[in-house]
Image (spheres, helix red, strand yellow):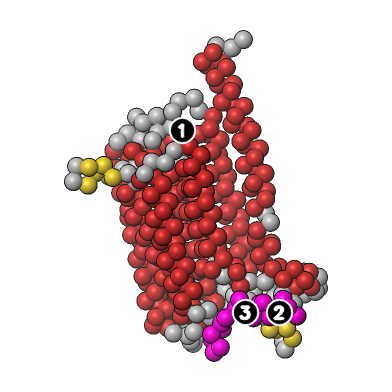
Amino acid sequence: MEETNKMEETTKKDEQTGTQKIGIYLWIWLLLFVLSFFSYMVDWYQFQGMLRWSLILFFMFLKAGLIMAFFMHLFWERYALVNVLLWPMTAIACFIFLMTAEFKYTLFSRFFYFVVGGA
Amino acid sequence: MSEQKIDGFELKPGFKGMASDTGSDQTMFKGVHWGKAMMWIFLLSDTFVFSCFLISYMKGRGSTIVDWPNTSEVFSLYVGGVPVPLLLIAIMTFVLITSSGTMALAVKYGYEKNRKMCGWLILATAVGGLTFVGMQVFEWSKLIHEGVRPWGNPFGASQFGSFFFMITGFHGFHVSIGVIFLFIYTYKVFAGHYESKKRGWFTKMKGDYVEIEILGLYWHFVDLVWVFIFAFFYLW
């Protein structure tokens, strides 16, 4: 019952048409502009190292999340659809993890045989 | 936005709802138009394609012993003799976000049966997409003039060119296809195909504004992919 109430609160729809209020879209639009501006500023001020990478990732995931949740309506979709779409992303995360190990190994081999000259 | 009420009974929300939806011995995505579900499945597969490109880029860039070209310098434009880093890319990003916003509003006005607003906003989206592709053509020709090739470039690691042309090219291809469809749907909306329930060309499905939401999903996805390309290829 509590969950139902929460759902009603989060889906404040226009009574006649069943669409969301225009304000939500305009706010998200503005937020996307601001976040893009910030991520451009990361390059403008030439932040380096961990600060640069963490800021880039932070703004990237925030922008991606906003687009998917509100522009692509996932926030209002039923969990059956949302879960089918989001769980496969863990496979991508695994692939990234595997390839990170792989590129480190390749880099090591190249240094070892091309620069150091092998054993 | 799936309907929460179907055939007079309320669907359960949250994970309980997910369990009863998937175990209902019926259609799994309750209240979701089949076209929308299929577009989502397509976008999921497309996500894997772009992920493979970006992961191979990560692997290529991470394993080269030659320095990677400094993207902030390679993609800078000279304004009044002063180099501005990533200027064109920043403008492209803003153009694409603008077109994504107009598309989101077009979907909303479509469902509200506001034919004219919906049509003009889709047209604005199409023009935004066309502008984006135009700027990408400019970017490509500039880099080709500077000697960037898929097998080498004057700025650093030779893998740079192949990843650049492959990733931005595939994304630009998606944008181009999107622009073509945006123009087609501008025509369909203004011609009133969704009021007269005119059937489409590939399907017997009667015209409905849900098609605009499906088109919108594709367009937002193109914007979504650009968010990742912008972060990993241009900024990293």
Q: Nearer the viewer, residue A40 or B53?
A: A40
Lower sequence index among marks 3 and 2 = 2
**Subunit bearing disc 3:** A
Q: Amino acid at mark 1?
A: Gln
Magenta residue span: A1-18
Q: Residue B19 got which mark?
A: none
Query: In this rendering, does residue B140 appear at all?
Result: no
Q: Amino acid at mark 2?
A: Thr
Report if the CB atoms under discs 3 and 1 are less than 8 Å apart: no
Determine whether, in the image, residue B5 is placed left or right of residue A114: right
Q: Quadrant of the N terminus of chain B?
A: bottom right
- Name the residue that disc number 2 marks: A4
- Residue at image position (56%, 16%) is A113
- Name the residue that disc number 1 marks: B159
Determine whether, in the image, residue B195 is placed left or right of residue B45: left
Residue B1 drawn in magenta:
no
- Residue at image position (60%, 78%) is A11
Query: In this rendering, does residue B74 appear at all?
Result: yes
Question: What's the distance in space between the residues labelled 2 and 1, CA to CA?
Answer: 53 Å
Q: Amino acid at mark 3?
A: Glu
Same chain for mark 2 and mark 1? The answer is: no
